[in-house]
Amino acid sequence: MKAQHFVVVLLLVSNITLFSVFLDVFVAAASADYTCFERDDLLPFDSKRLKEDLRENFLGQHIASNVIQRAVSSFMTDRNPNKPLVLSFHGTTGTGKNHAAKIIARNVYEKGENSKHVHLFISEHHFPHTEKLHFYSAQLKKQIHESVSRFPRSMFIFDEMDKMQPQLIDAIKPFLDYNACVDGVSFHKAIFLFLSNAGGNIITGVTLDFWRKGINRENIWMDSKELEIKITENIFNEKNSGFSYSSIIDEHLVDHYIPFLPLEMKHVRQCVLVEMAHMRITQNFDLADQVAKAMPYFPKEERVFAVKGCMSIRQKLSLYIN
Ligand SMILES: Nc1ncnc2c1ncn2[C@@H]1O[C@H](COP(=O)(O)OP(=O)(O)OP(=O)(O)O)[C@@H](O)[C@H]1O
Ligand SMILES: [Mg+2]
């Protein structure tokens, strides 16, 4: 072989090698992109895992725990649900409404509440100006529609639902309905969670009644003293509540109105122990007692229920450990 031929062959071979390296890089990049697009953080649903999670991490809420477990499990395992899952959480502050929403989210998505499929709306934060209602309403509809058309198993959490303008609640109504299909998009696989303090006083009243009669709170159920009906009546009649003006209640679009009971000192004590674990402090039962006792309780004489539930336990605890 002449020297020129050898150089030509060498050039050809090196070009081919170079080309194949480029090709490899291109294919790798393309497949990575493809994987990103295809891969999603939806978990294979496991009702046992949800049950365990609720049992271990959701304190003092036997009704909410039971209803959430059954409602979410049957919805997630239904191949063809006829409407989206719509749950409404009710209770006084710090009883675990956001906490329960997070538990549901982490049992549905790998990234839990941080999944891009979980959309949180806080009334006074996201929709503060009444004069912008038309704009908010259009934006909200667009966001729900786009999210579900991209990913049917999307989750929407509406916090402070009682402070939400009725027009905004009405804007989401078409998405909650039976056979909900808007502009060719089906909403049957979506999950809507409404969180509010509305009905909290009714729930506290019933729980206190049981406590005063010496009946274990675990005997309270959705139908005890018509609790669920009373909650709906209460939120419906509550003046200035977004719920009261909206037809969402009338049209039975909410699957369950779930009561969150006021927490007692023993639950607060458990919350302190959980917080100690989060803060990587050695568990100290005496300190947990001390912190729990230092929280405010009501009614004044009996001191049965924690005014703030398990809210701001960490802050209280940090005062003691410093
Ligand atoms: N039932 C519970 N079980 C375990 N932890 C709880 C429970 N309730 C509250 N907590 C703890 O207290 C914190 C505050 O509770 P959360 O934010 O869920 O209250 P909330 O019911 O949403 O109150 P608010 O009505 O004020 O919004 C939670 O992050 C969690 O750590
Ligand atoms: Mg909350």
Image (cartoon, rainbow, N blue to C red):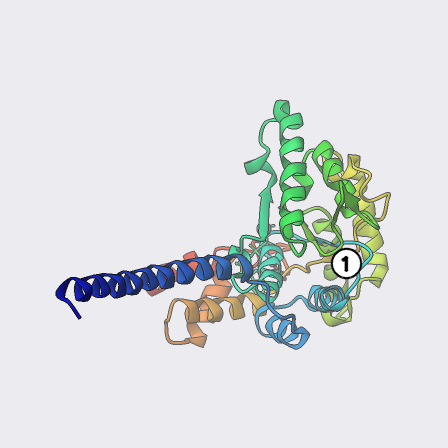
Q: Which residue sits at x=56%, y=37%?
A: 126
**In the current view of this chain or complex, which residue is farthest to the left?**
3
Disc 1 secondary structure class:
helix
101 or 152, nearer to the observer: 152
Q: Viewer-proximal residue, 252 or 265?
A: 252
Asked whether 235 or 298 is in front, the reply is 235
How many numbered circles does the render carry? Answer: 1
Q: Is residue 150 visible?
A: yes
Residue toward you, 282 or 154:
154
Going by the image, does 26 lie left or right of 147? left
How far from the left and from the top, in percent, is residue 95?
Answer: 61, 58
From what the image shows, is residue 67 above or below residue 56?
A: above
Which residue in the protein does label 1 denote? 206
Q: Report the quarter where the N terminus lies.
A: bottom left
Task: Decide: is 304 above or below 288.
Answer: above
Amino acid type at mark 1: Val
Residue 229 location (% of width, % of height): 84, 53
Image spot of residue 143 (x, y percent): 62, 40
Q: Residues within 10 Å of mark 1 (few under 14, many from 20)?
A: some
| Residue at position x 40%, y 63% in the image | 28
